[in-house]
Amino acid sequence: MANADTSATDVSGSMFDYANLNGANFEGSNLMDAAMTHVDLRNANLRNANLRNANLASVQLGGAQVKGTIIENTTFPDGVVRSGTFAP
């Protein structure tokens, strides 16, 4: 699924565990409650995406675009972020 385009799509609750999403476009997508453990999201576009309650444990985010991404109770490789938005 590298370079996949799911921009402005509702994929809430989806399971992407162990997927190669390098360079994927999730701009403006609803990824609420998504399971994305051990996922390669390097160079992905996550601008303005909704990552509330998403599990991104062991994810690779190098080079990912995260401007405006909503995070609340989101699990990242080093812990859980309770709330916030990546600065615009």
Image (cartoon, rainbow, N blue to C red):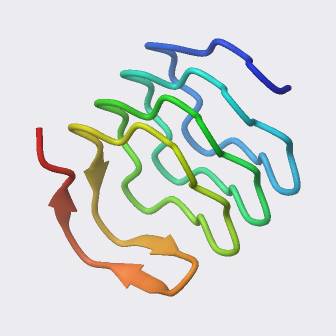
Q: Residue at x 12, y 48 (%)?
A: 87
Is 9 on the left-hand or right-hand side of 57?
left
Specify the farthest residue to the front: 63
Q: Residue 13, position in %: x, y?
A: 61, 45
The quarter in which the C terminus is drawn is top left
Q: Which residue is drawn at 51% across and 73% down?
A: 76
Q: Residue at x 86, y 45 (%)?
A: 19
Specify the farthest residue to the bottom: 79
**71 vs 15, nearest the viewer:** 71
Question: Is 31 rendered above or below residue 58?
Answer: above
Is 80 on the left-hand or right-hand side of 88?
right
- Using the rendered view, name the quadrant where residue 49 is placed: top left
Q: Which residue is drawn at 76% across and 55% down?
A: 39
Question: Is 62 rendered above or below residue 88?
Answer: below
Is 20 on the left-hand or right-hand side of 22?
right
The quarter in which the N terminus is drawn is top right
**84 vs 10, nearest the viewer:** 84
- Using the rendered view, name the quadrant where residue 24 is placed: top right
Is 27 on the left-hand or right-hand side of 85?
right
Question: Is 7 rendered above or below residue 72?
Answer: above
Q: Residue 67, position in %: x, y?
A: 25, 38
Q: Residue 62, position in %: x, y?
A: 57, 54
Figure disc tally: 0
